[in-house]
Structure formats: C-alpha cells, structure tokens
Image: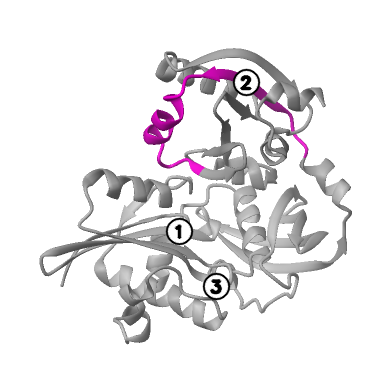
Amino acid sequence: MSFLFSKITNSRLMGTMGLRIARQIGNNRLDQYFLLDAEKVGIADYVSIKNGDERSLYEEEERLMGGLGSDRIFISEKEAMYLVNHFGNKNLRYNKEFPGYKDEYIEIIENKIDSVDYENLFIKISKKIETPVEFINYMTMRIIGGDYEALNFFSKYHIDDMNITDNEAVLLKNKVVPIKNNRYISEFIFEDDIYYRSKIGFNISDSNGHYKIESIIYIDKEEVDFNIVSNELMKEEYILVYNIENEFYKKFIYDNPKFMKSEFDSGVLVTEFKSNNNHVDKEVYYISGDINAIYYINDLQLVVATYDYDTKFEVEKALTEEYSEYINLDSEYKFENSLIYEFAQMGYDDFYDFIDE
C-alpha cells in the first residue's frame, strides 16, 4: 500500500471538513472521501471509489467539498491518518454509527497511529480569522455546536461544557453587538429540537490578528415561538421562472457536480452555495447566508431563487450564457419572504398554479 496524496478543506471553524485520501493498494487505486463533523458526530459520511475514472473522482470531490465555501489544501499522510483516527474516535465517544463501508478505514481508528502537532494542524485546516466580528460569530457557532475542542483552542483558559444545548443544535441567527474595550455580546437564536433565544458576552484579545477569548459569560436561554423565529429569519426572495427543454436537467447537473441535490415528488431542488464563507464576517449572521441560489427543476419549468439583486443579475446572466438553447425566461417576481421550499414540498408541477392558490 502506498500513499498518493490527501487534501482537505480548511473549513474547521465551520465545524465540518471534506477530506480526500488517495492510495495505491497493489494494482488498484482507492480514493476515499470523508466528511468530518466536529459537532458531536465524528465521521459523518464516507464514500470510496476503486479505480475510478477522472470524471467520477472529480464529481465525488466536488460533491464532498464544493459546498463548504473553503480552500482545499494538501496535507501529509501522517496528518490525514491522524484526522481519520481523531474524528473516528468521536464516533465511538458519541455513539455514532460509522458511515459507508467502514472496513476500508476502521483499522486507522482502532490501531495506534503516529502523533502530530495538532495545534499546527488545527491552524492549517482553519481559515485565518480577519475581524473581531468574524471571531465572535465563529465562537458562538462552536458553542452551539458543542465543539469545545475548537472553542478551547481559541481560549486563554479551559472552558467546560456550558450546557446550553442538549442535542445537535444549530445556530440560526446571531447579532454581534460591540460594547467597548474588546467586549462583545452575541444575541442569537438557535434550534435544539425547539427554538431558543439567548446571549453570550465575550471579552477577547487581539495579538497581531490572533484572537483569543479572555472571558465568557452565558445568559440563560428562553424558548421562542416558531412564528417569531420565522419573522427573524425572513428575507426577500427573487424568483425567475423559465420554460425548459428536456435536455436541460441532465446538462445542468453534469456541469455543476458541487451543487447539492434534494429529490421531491415533482422535481429536484438544487442548491448552489457561495464560494466562500464571508457571511460569517457580518454583524448579523444567518445560517442561510452561504446560499447563492436555489434551482427547482421539473419536467416543465426551472424556478430559480436568489436573495439579493446583484446575485439575481449574475445568476440570470450565467444561465443565459450557458443554457440559452435549453431555457427561456418566462417571468420574474420579488417576494417578501421565501417560497421556493414550500413550492418544492407542496408538489406542484407549475409555479403559477402554486402562487395562484
């Protein structure tokens, strides 16, 4: 067995990373694709390809890494094996099943492996934090995700589990409020089976762009009604409706393997994520801030949703340039809140019938 290469997304601060390992085993090549989840999961997904052609290997890498909004960096064999072992042991700790054909990687987890300088590796697999706002958003995200490994990496003292969440919670919205003298308050909403609102106070230090938590104060959470949460997360949605030819779907999916596909009764919802995670560097963070566009495709129509005018313009331009022989813009709308998911879930064949209801 010989190691060929390994690459990973530098998305550790988002909680998930895509890791690809390529190895030669006798006359066969094995490419392994791991989704590593630091939020009380471990190895969340695993796919392998044996003797794959260039296209299939590329498509699987894009499926795994393309939506994480991060750079891809090469790491050593020792570092790759360490990460599989490290995250695989999280599966054991949190009683999570190993995904995929675990026989292809279980020995890495069960056997003793060479140690690495994890502090240097952690820095390598994390993007550089540019501003205090970005730092506070990431730290709030890590707290809600129960990722105290990352939180303590950026803390000057050990932070025990703050017991804010009970399950695999998700940060939905956060507002960073600067106070003074490197002090900030996070005002956030999160989902943990039900919805909650809470606050955390941060006192941080900045040493030449290297941020650390000096102290942290948690203010107790309170339950929030679903309708209030919906209003908090509401945003304008631009909709484009196209008539399409039969060949469009196949070509669109082939051209965009990194887009995430979700099957519905009457069509397919395809999500395009932004190429970066710059939404984390905004004073008001939204979980959906990394979405660039959503495409719902059925036999008759392509319905496209975007969330600001500039993105709508760019997406419309790209579709026209690439697929003008397959699609024809029929109409466009602007709504006060998002409808694309409801349209997909309701099972309508025609968007016009849906909005006429």
Amino acid type assigned to the residue bearing label 3 in the image: Glu
In front of the other: 297 or 240: 297
Q: Amino acid at mark 2?
A: Leu
Q: Nearer the viewer, mark 1 or mark 2?
A: 2
In contact (CB < 8 Å): disc 1 and disc 3: no
Residue at 50% over, 54% down: 208
Determine contact: label 2, label 3, CB under 8 Å. Answer: no
Placement of the C terminus among the 4 image quadrants: top right
Please report the residue visible at 39 percent of the width from the left and 47 percent of the height from the top. 71
Q: Quadrant of residue 329?
A: top right
Residue closer to the observer: 113 or 204: 113
Q: Is residue 102 at least partly visible in the picture?
A: yes
Q: Quadrant of residue 353?
A: top right
Give the residue displayed 84% in from the left and 41% down from the top: 231
41 within the magenta span = no
Q: Position of residue 3 (x, y in %)?
A: 19, 66
Residue, disc 2: 240
C-alpha distance separating marks 1 and 3: 15 Å
Query: What crowding class fits label 3: few (fewer than 14 Cα within 10 Å), some (14-19), or many (20 or more)?
Result: some
User: What's the magenta region?
Assistant: 234-260
